Amino acid sequence: MMFSSRLDADLSPGRLQRALDRLRASGTPLLDLTRSNPPQCGLGPPPEALTRGLAVPRLAEYSPDPRGMLGARQAVARYYADRGLPTRPEAVFLSASTSQAYAELIKLFANPGDEILVPQPSYPLFDMLVALEGCRLVRFPSYCSAQGGWRIDEGALERAFTSRTRAVILVSPNNPTGAYLPPDQLSAIQRLCAAKGCPIILDEVFYDYPAEGFTALAAPGEDEARGLTLRLSGLSKVVGAPQIKLGWVRISGADAAVREAGGRLEYIADAYLSASTPAQLAAEVLLPARGPLQARIRERLGENHRAAGQAFAGGSPAHLHSREGGWYLVVRLPEGEDDEDLTFHLLVDDRVIVQPGFFFDFPQGEHLVLSLLTPVAEFAEGLSRVAARIAARAYGKRIKV
């Protein structure tokens, strides 16, 4: 039987996944430092909040709109207004998830074989989403600045453009580096993309979670000359509710481009009508109540970040990259360390699950990626084992398991 070339010919799991599957099948207790599901980490919206969103007569109705129900789009528009980005509901499109939104936007701008520019390092899902649309992913690098934060190499981005480039994906804050796009850099990239006739897809799902002591800078004023910017987010991160499948796109830019892109995106969205009525009704209730939900998540992120700082302080051979926001933390390993081998032995010897940096396509050095959303006690114990294993490998020590 023939299958699409959009899929890899071999989808069998790798060594890490096989080992993890065996341990889980045997019932072996594991400390999972990759957990990023708020409800599973005790941080999702309480049941009564979800019930309020669904306990309305409109739940029994179905009035499909390609852009999404007006009440839900108004709630999203108010969310952006609270961030200093005045937004009309007409500029908002709802979808089943941000992944669905990516698929629709790539369909909107690209033909099979065209190129989508993606930052490096970044979330590995982009490889899959771009490939499933029959397009080619092209990476442009970030670098760790002298101040410790990751920044996009604007020169490398400009050089990455070809006649087949159809969109640039930006992520703020980046997953996993946690770096926010500085407003001046975003403005410069908007001008570059406008000159190239290329839209920006700006993923902001972690925007509401700055690190302690860091303030996310205000968005630059939206200049009509800057082409198209399409901001993505959703309930999964904004209110910690991935079980309520709802994502969105906010379109801004030159009026003529916004009108044409909006009309064509409406045509695509009408073919799927993917956003469910219950999810849209829940958004009307959950988005205005996001403050306490986000505060609980930020408290968890801060507590675990502080614990990690203590674990890798002093004489540790590893160190933490600075984090401006998001849910993840990057550990820079000693020079010459093998992050895949370390991850494997942390799993099979120490019973700790972490993610190796190569999953996220780090351009240099070796890294581990940890989820700060992990319950505090589990994170602390797992962190202790990770730090001990790194030190043992760096100094040639034996440790008790």
Image (cartoon, rainbow, N blue to C red):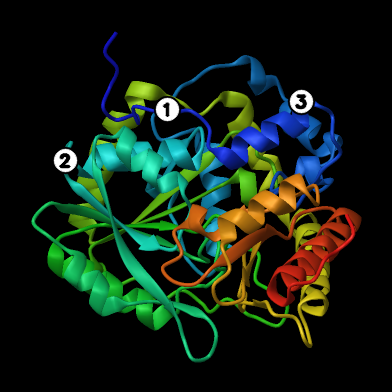
- Place of residue 152 in the rendered image (x, y in percent of width and height, measured from the top left): 38, 75
Q: CA distance from mark 2 to mark 1?
A: 31 Å
Which residue lies under the disc numbered 1? 65
Q: CA distance from mark 2 to mark 3?
A: 41 Å
Q: Mark 2 or mark 1: which comes first in sequence?
A: 1
- Place of residue 275 in the rendered image (x, y in percent of width and height, measured from the top left): 50, 29
Q: Secondary structure at mark 3?
A: helix
Res 225 seen here: no
Indicate the amino acid at tag 3. Answer: Ala
Which residue lies under the disc numbered 2? 113
Q: Relative to residue 212, is residue 351 depicted above or below?
A: above
Query: Which of 38 and 278 lies nearest the eye of the viewer?
Result: 38
Q: Residue at x 31, y 38 (%)?
A: 131
Label 1 crowding class (10 Å Cα cut-off): few <14, some 14-19, many 20+?
some
Q: Secondary structure at mark 2?
A: loop
Q: Residue at x 60, y 55 (%)?
A: 341
Assess whether mark 1 and mark 2 are in contact (beta carbons under 8 angstroms). Answer: no
Q: Mark 2 or mark 3: which comes first in sequence?
A: 3
Indicate the amino acid at tag 2. Answer: Gly
Image depth: mark 3 or mark 1 in front: 3
- Place of residue 294 in the rendered image (x, y in percent of width and height, measured from the top left): 74, 58
Q: Mark 3 or mark 1: which comes first in sequence?
A: 3
User: Is 92 situated left or right of 14 in this image?
Assistant: left
Res 285 seen here: yes
Q: Relative to residue 341, is residue 104 depicted above or below?
A: above
Q: Residue at x 36, y 37 (%)?
A: 103
Using the image, tell me which numbered label, if any, was put on residue 25: 3
User: Is 84 situated left or right of 115 in this image?
Assistant: right
